[in-house]
Image (cartoon, helix red, strand yellow):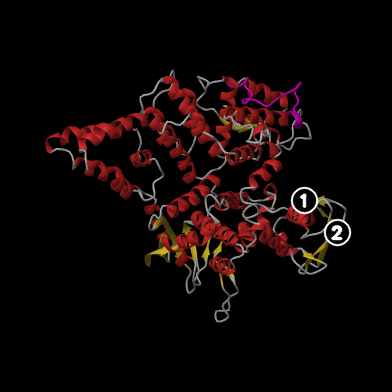
Amino acid sequence: MTLSTAQKTIEQLLTGNRQYQIPDFQRPYVWEEPQAIALVNDLLDAWRMNDGDYFLGSIVLVDHPGGDNVDIIDGQQRLTTLCIIVALLRHLAGTDAGLHDEIGQLLSIPESRIKGLDERPRLSVRECDRTFFDTFIVGDNIDSLLDVDANSLTPPSVRRIHDNARAMLDSLSDPEILPPEDIQNFVQYLMLQVSLIEVTTDSYQAAHRIFSVLNTRGVPLAATDIFKAQVLSHVAPANRPRYAALWEEAINSLATDNPDAFFGHLLTLMLRSPAKRALIDCFTEQVLTPFFATKSGEQFIDEVLVPSARAYALATLAPLAGHPAATPLELLRLYDSADWKPAAMYVLGSDRSENDVRALLTSLERIYGTAVAARVVPGTRTLIVTQFISAIDDGQSVDLACYVPDDIRHRAASTIARPLPQSSIRKILLYHAMVAEQHSFPQGLPRSLGVLPGLPTKQIRGVHGDIDAAAWNKRLGGLILTTLKSRTINQAPDWDTVSRACHEVPVVGLSEVGALPSTRGEIHASTLEARQQHLTRLILDYWNIRRDSEGVDLSRLTSAELAAAVDKRSAARGRQVRLADVVATGIISPGDTFIWRRRNLGNVYVVSISPEGTIVLHDGQEVSSPSAAVTALTGTSSAAALDVFVRESDGKKLRELWNTYRNRFGA
């Protein structure tokens, strides 16, 4: 057995002739949107903080005998997601041809005549995912990917590639998060300062043994231990035993295996701004060093650590029955993310009346919840939270400190209107609707209460044929809070059985969020639409964002109208460009004819453009997008629609016309 290890930057990993292959025996690509978004946000935060070298973990590889290629035994999820990020950055590089092409070279290995090798992808995914990944990710077809109907994609791993790419593009294309002029700088950071440990062997048995060892974690030295030593060094020797015990008592009161997170929140609270550097360096230089210039270690523990730990425990751990701010605190605890905690510590650690505490935490939950619903990235959410702290500290009115701008209102309303990812946002929205309906956080909720698609996956009596169950089971109007199991709904013989089972669930059974509407044992699409609108109004009213600054009622807008409002942020830079957009500018004209010649199969498809900006097929059927045309013509979504259709009059591909639109009207 041979074994080698090396630290490699992403640029080193993605250059040369080595192809990384994911064997078909490996598990599928399983990362969901929250994991993909977390990786993007971590990278963006590290870049913004100029956080030196960023370590991304390890990958375990097995060499192919006598060749450049390797099999990936551990690390396929990260490497696949990294390649998607690289493809998105190439897409966003746009008209900067040099940067665009250089990024593209990272995803493909060039042809080698000496070795007799064709150009091939840097990452070779499992066979069932390969056509989609090579076409849309490696093949520089993000525009076409945006146009693909996700509901048509199989297997689930392909759907995840599609959904994660779209979700990450939302973050990367937001000019407030990654300004266009900073794309090259971020690419440089990603390529040159982000690294992995590459472990390579020539034996599958050894590779799996290494994988097991790497995933059995020890207990590393924590930042908390370093801070303790620094603080106690400023405590008088005679007082150290007592203050060491006070330190341990405060840390133990947090009831967490990761007290470093508490110090991260404390750092944000004390700086009144997001940290710009790594925790150990920043906390030492910007908190401890200035503090000890005039005060002692005893004072730090008495005045800072102990009261802050008490406020943290109250915000995150304390039983809330009878607490004046129980409702906003219960809602805040629903969020997966924790960047609201510094502001909650600030409010709960201050000497305020119960009414003031309730009002401030309700306002905090409002601005934080709307930011989460608007899919604001963590760095920006932290900025919102610290601005809230500073505004209240400066004596501003709560209304002024907690104003939610139109951009956030539009994006939050758009999220509610769209299909929702399988993440905590579903539970968050339904709980907000329940609180709005009942005017407080209900007591006695069952521990097993969770979110479930409310419609059976198969057609049963009482479910009207106009209902698209697959679509509604992802929208707010088709989701319920319940303790039922999915099989109870999916195995029911008729809708009346489903309805009765849902209504019998304690506490929520008779609530709007606990069951779908039923009339005489039947359910129709119109009643689901009415429920969608009702729940939307409850949530938007609770957050007080139902109307924007121009008085527009956001609950009345369609998904398309909300998407158009959101897209004003970034014009055509990162969003889906629609055929109707291009037709409206005259770049494509009504009556233009496009041809797709499939030479390998001998098929020729001819389509035309209608005055409404739709594609008319040979049989008269109209579809709204190029990818929909591909699916209608072939039954699959595996072709890059922008590259296959060519305008008959001048030979231009749809890709060229799309790029013309972007160059003229993009941000």
Residue 507: in magenta span: yes
Q: Which residues are magenta?
A: 506-527
Judge the density around disc 2: few (<14), some (14-19), many (≥20) Cα neighbours within 10 Å: some
What label does residue 624 carry, if any?
A: 1
Q: Position of residue 449 (x, y in %)?
A: 54, 27
Q: Is residue 129 above or below residue 465?
A: below
Identify which amino acid the numbered label 2 is placed on. Answer: Gly
- Residue at 38 percent across and 27 percent down: it is 348
How many numbered dots are placed on residues in this image? 2
| Residue hosting label 2 | 591
- Which quadrant holds residue 460? top right
Residue 204 visible at all = no
User: Given the current orientation, which residue lies at the most extreme top position?
Assistant: 322
Judge the density around disc 1: few (<14), some (14-19), many (≥20) Cα neighbours within 10 Å: some
User: Given the current orientation, which residue lies at the most extreme right position?
Assistant: 619
Comparing labels 2 and 1, the label whose residue is closer to the camera: 2
Residue 480: in magenta span: no
Give the camera-side residue of 519 and 664: 664
